Image (cartoon, grey):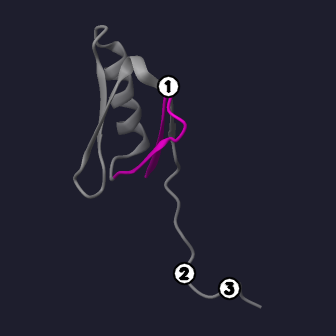
Amino acid sequence: MEVKIGVRSVHRELVVETDLSAEQVEEEIRNALAADRGGVFAITDAKGRRVVVPVASLGFVEIGEDESRPVGFGGTL
């Protein structure tokens, strides 16, 4: 699952590939936003690295879809 995180006043977005489902990512975001003023949004990527962003700096979080990629060299005739 690909998660894009926009941070305020930062030109580029953070892109994290995680093993969490969309529902789990959304729950983490909700928990971070519900925390008191000093909350952080934290997510672990597929390689075990942890990304932590202060909630006050979050611009947006885009949760990608689980997509199956086609295998092969093209369509069938």
Give neighbour class at mark 2: few <14, some 14-19, many 20+ (Cα, 10 Å): few
Quadrant in the picture for residue 14: top left
Q: Amino acid at mark 3?
A: Gly
Residue 1 percent coordinates (x, y): 43, 52
60 on left or right of 50: right
Give neighbour class at mark 3: few <14, some 14-19, many 20+ (Cα, 10 Å): few
Q: Find the magenta span and give its range.
A: 1-18
Q: Amino acid at mark 1?
A: Arg
Q: Nearer the viewer, mark 1 or mark 2?
A: 1
Quadrant in the picture for residue 52: top left
Secondary structure at badge 3 equals: loop
Residue occupying the far bottom of the picture: 77
Residue that carries the numbered disc 3 in the rendered image: 74
Secondary structure at badge 1 equals: loop
Q: Amino acid at mark 2?
A: Val
Residue occupying the far left of the picture: 48
Residue that carries the numbered disc 1 in the rendered image: 8
Residue 62 percent coordinates (x, y): 52, 38
Please report the residue visible at 35 percent of the width from the left and 38 percent of the height from the top.
24
Q: Is residue 8 magenta?
A: yes
Name the quadrant of the C terminus.
Answer: bottom right
